[in-house]
Image (tube, helix red, strand yellow):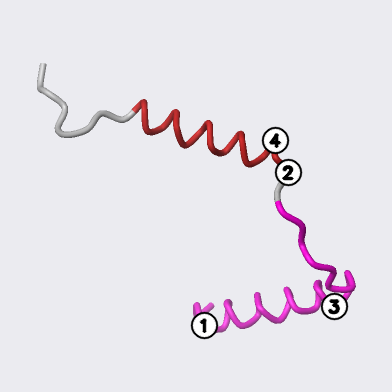
Amino acid sequence: MHPDIHLALHHARAAELRAETGARPTRRPALRTRLGWTLIEVGLKLATRPGPVPAL
């Protein structure tokens, strides 16, 4: 399937689903979720080394 057609079908289906749910606005992520993603981001920054890794 051509990517443009696939994208158009996706948008059409998403519009149908929004119409079925009443299109209520989405709420902000909970504090627990935001804190969790922040901790993951900090952990990834700490785990990666800056610069090239020395050869053994």
Q: Which residues are magenta?
A: 1-28
Q: Mark 4 or 3 closer to N-term? A: 3
Name the residue located 85 percent from the left edge and 78 percent from the top edge: 19
**Hey, what amino acid is under mark 1?**
Asp
Total residue callouts: 4
Spatial CA distance of label 3 from label 1 is 23 Å
The residue that disc 1 covers is 4
Category of crowding for the residue at label 4, using alpha-carbon neighbours closer than 10 angstroms: few (below 14), some (14–19), many (at least 20): few
Q: Is residue 24 above or below residue 2?
A: above
Q: Position of residue 23 (x, y in %)?
A: 83, 73
Q: Residue at x 73, y 73 (%)?
A: 14
Q: Amino acid at mark 4?
A: Arg
- Give left or right: position of 49 versus 45: left
Q: Residue furthest front?
A: 31
Rounded to the nearest angstrom, the CA distance separating label 2 from label 1 is 35 Å
Q: Residue 9 lies in what quarter of the image?
A: bottom right
Task: Looking at the picture, tell me which residue is in the foreground, 11 or 48.
Answer: 48
Give the mark, 2 or 3, whose residue is nearer the N terminus. 3
Q: Which element carries disc 4, helix, strand or loop?
A: helix
Q: Are marks 2 and 4 in contact (CB under 8 Å)?
A: yes
- What residue is shown with label 3? 19
Q: Earlier in the sequence, mark 3 or mark 1?
A: 1
User: Could you tell me if the residues under marks 2 and 1 are in contact, i.e. CB atoms within 8 Å?
Assistant: no
Residue 48 percent across, percent down from the top left: 31, 30
Picture layout, residue 5 above or below residue 25: below
Residue linked to disc 4 = 32
